[in-house]
Image: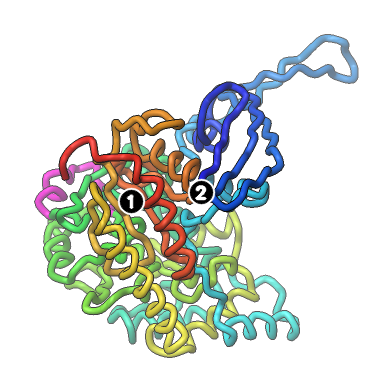
Amino acid sequence: MAVSLHNSTGISGVGFDSQFLGSHSASKASVSVSFHSSLTNLSLKSVETSKQHSYRITAMSKTESSSDQVKLDISLSPRVNSVKPSKTVAITDHATALAQAGVPVIRLAAGEPDFDTPAIIAEAGINAIREGYTRYTPNAGTLELRTAICHKLKEENGISYSYDQIVVSNGAKQSILQAVLAVCSPGDEVIIPAPYWVSYPEMARLADATPTILPTLICDNFLLDPEVLESKISEKSRLLVLCSPSNPTGSVYPKKLLEKIAEIVAKHPRLLVLSDEIYEHIIYAPATHTSFASLPGMWERTLTVNGFSKAFAMTGWRLGYIAGPKHFVAACNKIQSQSTSGASSIAQKAGVAALGLGYAGGEAISTMVKAFRERRDFLVKSFGELEGVKISEPQGAFYLFIDFSSYYGIEAEGFGKIKNSESLCRYFLDKAQVALVPGDAFGDDSCIRISYAASLTTLQAAFERIKKALISLRPAVPV
């Protein structure tokens, strides 16, 4: 099974960058799509796209009182121009567009569970609407929800907060951005282990801070080396970002490793820690989750971010929160008060119901995690049998971050040279109709991220397509 995607400029394949990621050249492309199988031939409708991009456009207009032409400056701020668009969002939108055009694309790029929100949570939201709970809430969130969050953090994470040390936001992403804006000043450095979630460096740039990237190794399960961390901390270091379980690698930081990191952090009075724990409940035994703020001496300097999107399958509800010392959290609350104001009243009622499901989400969440683990095990075994592939088995979340770099440099017939993770993802989309995310979006160009937030049947079909696409390729170097 193969799909051929060509544009009028003669460039083979599908380019994520030029069509969706803000290429700085003006272009108009006509894309025709055809799909062939050994069993059948299908002719699909063509997809017409037209995109024009530029850093700065000067428009001409006339005032009502004068015939003189006036140049209108519609340039954007340097801060915004320094930020890269999200490649995961772009590729997800791209794959969706192809699917709508009739291409049988398997979409494994998005980072959201394929399960419905548990019924009891959904009913709480529906009841909130029926009961007229549709007005503004306090900016930081309802007292009911913040109290429930405090209880959860105490019982499950071993960290104590009062309700005024919690701010509920429109998703954990907003919580993280507000934290970065609240504590970072121009010239500060934000230390980010790579591979990283795509938004961390861009959030640092939005705060006029500098992202300092610390690479990790697949042979170390993509975990930060404390010695590397210590060697990179400077007087400009303001924030260390930790994500466990990790997006994109699924790595989980053991408690002993976190303790070593905490010992280093404690030596630097300016250094704070943002602990992104959004995947904490999607974890596979024997791995266990440790909240960084629970470690000795770390509560005072840790901003803990969590939410409802991943574990409770509530991505569309947009509900997250931050917990930390009142001084920092109050600053986040102030930013929110002048931007979005409080989160949805309906979503907050649903959040209370979610936290009422029991420890770690109860049976509803454990059922999802069991399914995720079955999918992970299938993919790890299957990809582990392919030539030229390196895998670090994920201990949490629902991603595989696979090293395909041994295939770089190969000329693929009818496609061209596979140069990097992006061209390999284009190859998989072109030849296998599987949408994945290139590792360069996460700071590691040797790998590709596969989301297994899809049914086992879908993952089995995706693997067979990828395997078939790789048959004609051979590793350029021994692995």
* Residue found 47% across the figure and 88% down from its top: 357
C-beta proximity under 8 Å, tags 1 and 2: no
Q: Which residue: 9% across, 51% down?
A: 227
Specify the segment rendered in magenta.
226-240
Q: Is residue 474 above or below residue 455?
A: above
Left or right of 179 on screen, residue 387: left
Q: Nearer the viewer, residue 356 or 453?
A: 453
Can residue 368 be seen at all in this image of the molecule? yes
Q: What residue occupies the far front of the structure in this picture?
A: 39
Circle number at residue 147: none
Q: Residue at x 41, y 69 (%)?
A: 306
Query: Which of pointers 1 and 2 indicates the residue nearer the eye?
Result: 2
* Magenta span includes 238: yes
Q: Position of residue 393 (x, y in %)?
A: 25, 63
Tell me: residue 198, above or below residue 54: below
Q: Is 46 in front, or is 257?
A: 46
Q: Is residue 255 left or right of residue 246?
A: left
What amino acid is found at the position of numbered circle 1 in the picture? Tyr
The location of residue 225, given as percent across then percent down, is: 14, 54
**Which three-letter amino acid code belongs to the residue tagged 2?**
Met
Name above or below for residue 47 compared with residue 198: above
When asked about the image quadrant of residue 116, the answer is bottom right
Residue 268 in the image: state x and y as whole percent. 17, 53
**Residue 196 - label:** 1
Question: Which residue lies under the disc numbered 2?
Answer: 1
Answer few, some or many: residues within 10 Å of disc 1's Cα (few below 14, many 20 plus, some between 14 and 19).
many
Give the color scheme: rainbow, by chain, secondary structure or one colour: rainbow
| 345 versus 30 height, above or below | below
Q: Secondary structure at mark 2?
A: loop
| Quadrant in which residue 129 is drawn | bottom right
- Of mark 1 and mark 2, the one earlier in the sequence is 2
